Image (cartoon, helix red, strand yellow):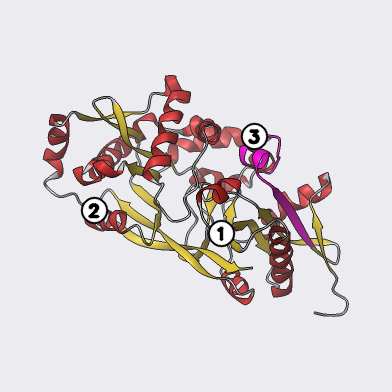
């Protein structure tokens, strides 16, 4: 490091450091055509412990790295108490990792966060996750040619090298697949599948927006059951599920959310969202004074969706419910003018789902990675 360069890591404890933390990505990515600026108002709420359900019940500390007094990097150090309850390891996490292309800054940030979690009893360090694996997680390592879909991460390609330099190893990969209305293929069996399921008293219905709290409770229960054997699984709380629903409700399409029921008992669900990133990107993170009008006008121009979650209880997975979810998603998407979908994220060791996606001719086009190191 040049003798004139001075690095200083500060914990976020005041309005200035909080704003430096929140606004850093807007400065770093301002010339990157693929980055989608999140709404500043939502970012400020997300990192506010009074507004974020996760931060209310888990230790999280935010750090900013200053180079000669100017914010040049940031990181969140995270203890996820639910992880410690449900797993035998004492893994802690880092997230919100961003920095200029300076390996010394990255090293200082990661070291600071590592020491913070180690002091609190962690023996394994993973990331990036913000704040939980149930939120935006992973480092993009392949597929930098276009903007991310809604609620998916994007980052500079040099981050992978920086993490490896700090002795992080690959922990788990997960994939994003893409498919369009012209490339998707269904077996001829799918035409008879719904009738066969109905004969077994298995029906598929759309989301009831008049009972959002009850629907969120159903999906929370299904998620925690269907995903419990997945790598890194963390149960989602009822409050988190409802918070997520409230956040996406303004642009959610009820006929792109499905619940499968057997004799009235929920056994699976699928959640797809219009890709709001298509219309957020030009707004620069701001709705005022007139961008809210621009957003309202352009939201009808969205042409793609993301299949965010899909899960079926273990005892019902061989019945083809997932194929029917995909077929109904395609049918209803076309009614709204959506012609392309991303299906993400899919764990590399989720062989069943990866096989299903190959069967419908989905193409794997992005790879994300969770890194880890023993501490």
Which residue is the site of mark 1? 33
Q: Is residue 152 above or below residue 299?
A: below
219 sits left or right of 127 in the view: left
Estimate how packed mark 3 is, as few (under 14), some (14 to 19) or many (20 or more) residues with alpha carbons within 10 Å: few
**Tag 2 secondary structure:** loop
Q: Is residue 40 above or below residue 365?
A: above
Q: Which mark is nearer the camera, 3 or 1?
A: 1
Q: Are marks 3 and 1 in contact (CB under 8 Å)?
A: no
**Whole-percent x, y for residue 255 in the image:** 34, 31
**Seen from this angle, which residue lies furthest front?**
88
Residue 304 appears in the figure: no
Say which residue appears at 33% left-offset and 34% top-offset: 258
Which residue is the site of mark 2? 360
Label whose residue precedes the other's in the sequence (2 or 3): 3
Q: Which mark is nearer the camera, 2 or 1?
A: 2
Estimate how packed mark 1 is, as few (under 14), some (14 to 19) or many (20 or more) residues with alpha carbons within 10 Å: few
Which quadrant would residue 49 be assigned to in this image? top right
**Whole-percent x, y for residue 135 in the image:** 53, 47
Which residue is the site of mark 3? 290
Which residue is more in the foreground, 25 or 238?
Answer: 238
Q: Which residues are magenta?
A: 47-65
């Amino acid at each position: 490091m040049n003798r004139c360069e001075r690095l200083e890591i500060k914990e976020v404890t005041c309005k200035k450091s909080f704003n430096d933390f929140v606004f850093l990505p807007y400065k770093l990515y301002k010339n990157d055509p693929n980055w989608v600026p999140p709404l500043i108002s939502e970012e400020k709420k997300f990192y506010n412990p009074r507004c974020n359900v996760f931060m209310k019940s888990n230790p999280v500390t935010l750090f900013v790295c200053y180079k000669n007094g100017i914010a040049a990097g940031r990181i969140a150090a995270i203890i996820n108490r639910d992880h410690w309850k449900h797993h035998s390891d004492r893994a802690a996490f880092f997230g919100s990792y961003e920095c200029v292309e300076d390996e010394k800054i990255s090293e200082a940030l990661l070291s600071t966060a590592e020491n913070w979690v180690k002091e609190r009893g962690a023996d394994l360090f993973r990331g990036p996750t913000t704040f939980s694996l149930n939120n935006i997680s992973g480092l993009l390592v392949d597929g930098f040619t276009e903007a991310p879909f809604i609620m998916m991460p994007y980052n500079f390609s040099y981050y992978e090298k920086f993490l490896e330099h700090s002795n992080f190893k690959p922990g788990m990969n997960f994939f994003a697949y893409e498919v369009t209305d012209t490339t998707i293929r269904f077996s001829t069996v799918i035409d008879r599948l719904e009738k066969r399921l109905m004969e077994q008293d298995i029906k598929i219905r759309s989301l009831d927006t008049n009972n959002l709290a009850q629907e969120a409770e159903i999906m929370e229960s299904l998620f925690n059951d269907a995903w419990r054997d997945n790598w890194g699984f963390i149960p989602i709380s009822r409050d988190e599920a409802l918070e997520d629903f409230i956040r996406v409700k303004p642009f959610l399409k009820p006929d792109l959310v499905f619940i499968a029921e057997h004799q009235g008992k929920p056994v699976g669900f699928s959640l797809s969202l219009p890709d709001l990133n298509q219309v957020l990107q030009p707004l620069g993170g701001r709705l005022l004074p007139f961008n809210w009008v621009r957003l309202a006008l352009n939201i009808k121009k969205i042409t793609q969706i993301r299949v965010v979650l899909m899960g079926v209880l273990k005892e019902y997975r061989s019945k083809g419910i997932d194929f029917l979810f995909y077929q109904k998603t395609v049918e209803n998407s076309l009614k709204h003018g959506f012609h392309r979908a991303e299906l993400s994220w899919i764990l590399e060791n989720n062989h069943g789902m990866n096989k299903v996606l190959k069967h419908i001719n989905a193409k794997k086009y992005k790879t994300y990675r969770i890194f880890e190191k023993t501490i």
